[in-house]
Image (cartoon, helix red, strand yellow):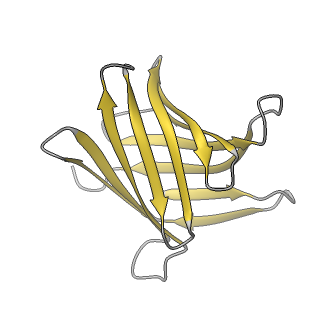
């Protein structure tokens, strides 16, 4: 994956990285691992997401945790057209919106946004351009 981090001062940081996705809990959930930058470089992010489908809400309960950065988030994810949109709150108390867009069999574009309150506009903080390397 290629990552872009948009900082508050208008500068950007770029990294490469890797993602690993798989079914867990006997097919009841999806777990992924996000690593930045690509190994063997020292990690600046090393976290995991657990997504569990709940037919009662027709959506996914999502838990993200990056112990390296002491960061975590809880969200609810649902399909919105061709995209997947996850809404929740992060460890700083900010509202989060994470979107999977341009989804194909071999790639997707992930957009991370945040805001302090419902009246604030969404600010893009991260983008990940992810592509499959092993079919």
Nearer to me, 19 or 105? 19
88 displayed left or right of 41: right
86 displayed left or right of 19: right
Identify whether 5 is placed above or below 113. Answer: below
Q: Position of residue 25 (x, y in %)?
A: 17, 46
Residue lying at 69% horizontally and 49% vertically, measured from the top left: 93
Nearer to me, 56 or 127? 56
99 displayed left or right of 63: right
Q: Where is residue 29 in the image (x, y as percent from the top left)?
A: 25, 41
Q: Quadrant of residue 38?
A: bottom left
Residue lying at 44% horizontally and 63% vertically, measured from the top left: 47
Can residue 101 be seen in this snapshot?
no
**Residue farthest along the right direction in this orientation:** 9
Q: Position of residue 62 (x, y in %)?
A: 42, 41
Can residue 80 be seen in this snapshot?
yes
Residue lying at 43% horizontally and 48% vertically, measured from the top left: 63
- Badge count: 0
Residue lying at 46% horizontally and 59% vertically, measured from the top left: 65
87 displayed left or right of 21: right
Q: Where is residue 128 in the image (x, y as percent from the top left)?
A: 53, 51
Identify whether 95 is placed above or below 84. Answer: below
Nearer to me, 17 or 96? 96
**Residue farthest along the left direction in this orientation:** 26
Nearer to me, 6 or 132? 6
Identify whether 80 is placed above or below 15. Answer: above
């Amino acid at each position: 994956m290629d990552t872009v981090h948009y900082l508050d001062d208008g500068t950007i940081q770029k990294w490469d990285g890797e993602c690993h996705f798989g079914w867990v809990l006997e097919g009841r959930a999806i777990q992924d691992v996000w690593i930045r930058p690509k190994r063997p470089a020292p990690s600046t992010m090393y976290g995991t997401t657990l997504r569990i489908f709940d037919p009662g809400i027709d959506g996914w309960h999502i838990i993200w945790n990056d112990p390296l950065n002491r960061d975590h988030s809880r969200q609810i994810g649902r399909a919105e057209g061709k995209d997947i949109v996850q809404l929740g709150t992060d460890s700083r108390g900010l509202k989060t919106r994470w979107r999977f867009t341009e989804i194909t069999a071999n790639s997707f574009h992930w957009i991370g946004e945040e805001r302090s309150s419902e009246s604030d506009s969404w600010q893009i903080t991260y983008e990940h351009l992810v592509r499959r390397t092993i079919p």
